[in-house]
Image (spheres, rainbow, N blue to C red):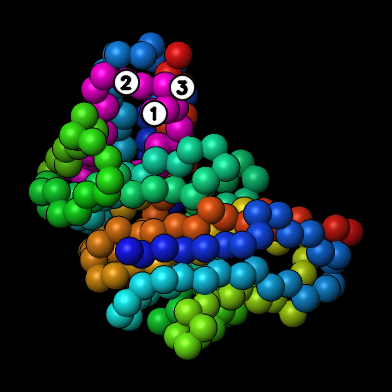
């Protein structure tokens, strides 16, 4: 069965510190991995997807098939990064499977 | 603005009643998915429609049903409401099979009492 695990429900770091939000998945095959973000009072929006290998708002995520992980990283956190982050996977044209989410708080 | 709108924003229903939630996607978005998000949880897939036909379903009972219309609008219907159906219901659309990522609506908050 497909499963996405985000082990930290809450993560708090200081402004300027590095951030890493963990995501592990279980799936046999080659899934497509995503990170979605939800800022306060805003809708869920796509942050990045592993196949595009891009950096959005300074965030990057590398797919590690050996460790079945897709951790989200940013070298220097900013206060506007405070939000709810969801890792998700998908196979083909089908459903997105989401993790439970991590609430990231950046302290000034 | 993202172009996916949902109505109503909030709704209170009594156990046993039926409810219809609506979603309006961007023109050209042929794929629409519905998700249920319980408090403190990530969204859970209910079903997906492509060109007005259901092409994927999650672990939800048949009393959860849907429709997609040619004008890029869609509905989620829930019959015989239960207290556990209280959640945020999200609609997400994509121009194709989600290849460009899904655009989510703001959701409908359903409370069943």
The answer for which chain carries disc 3 is B
Q: Which mark is residue B81?
A: 2
Question: Does residue B34 lie above or below B6 as drawn?
Answer: below
Mark 2 crowd level (few <14, some 14–19, many ≥20, 10 Å Cα): many
Q: Is residue A3 left or right of residue B46?
A: right
Q: Name the chain under label 1.
A: B
Precedes in sequence: disc 3 or disc 2 = 2
- Tell me, yes or no, whether dots 2 and 1 are on the same chain: yes
Magenta stretch bounds: B71-91
Q: Estimate the x, y position of residue A73 in percent, counting from the top left.
A: 65, 76
Q: What residue would you read off at disc 1? A: B85
Q: Chain of mark 2?
A: B
Figure quadrant of residue A62: bottom right
| In front: label 3 or label 1 | 1
Residue at x-position 36% and y-position 64%: A2
Camera-nearest residue between A90 and B76: A90
Q: Secondary structure at mark 3?
A: strand
x and y percentages locating residue A97 in the rendered image: 39, 59
The reply to whether label 3 and label 1 mark residues of one chain is yes
Could you tell me how far apart the alpha carbons at marks 3 and 2 are, in whole angstroms? 10 Å
Q: Is residue B109 left or right of residue A81?
A: left
């Amino acid at each position: 069965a497909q499963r996405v695990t985000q082990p930290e429900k809450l993560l708090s770091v200081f402004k300027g510190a590095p951030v890493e939000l963990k995501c592990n998945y279980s799936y046999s095959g080659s899934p497509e991995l995503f990170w979605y973000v939800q800022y306060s009072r805003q809708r869920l929006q796509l942050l990045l997807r592993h196949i595009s290998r891009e950096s959005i708002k300074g965030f990057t995520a590398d797919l590690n098939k050996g460790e079945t992980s897709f951790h989200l990283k940013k070298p220097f956190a900013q206060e506007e990064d405070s939000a709810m982050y969801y890792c998700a996977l998908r196979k083909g044209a089908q459903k997105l499977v989401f993790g439970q989410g991590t609430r990231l708080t950046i302290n000034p | 603005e993202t172009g996916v709108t949902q109505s109503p924003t909030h709704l209170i229903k009594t156990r046993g009643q039926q409810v219809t939630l609506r979603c309006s996607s961007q023109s050209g978005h042929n794929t629409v998915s519905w998700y249920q998000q319980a408090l403190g949880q990530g969204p859970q897939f209910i079903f997906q429609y492509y060109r007005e036909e259901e092409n994927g379903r999650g672990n939800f009972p048949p009393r959860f049903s849907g429709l997609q219309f040619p004008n890029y609008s869609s509905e989620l219907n829930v019959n015989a409401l239960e207290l556990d159906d209280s959640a945020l219901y999200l609609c997400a659309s994509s121009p194709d099979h989600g290849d460009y990522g899904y655009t989510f609506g703001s959701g409908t908050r359903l409370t069943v009492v």
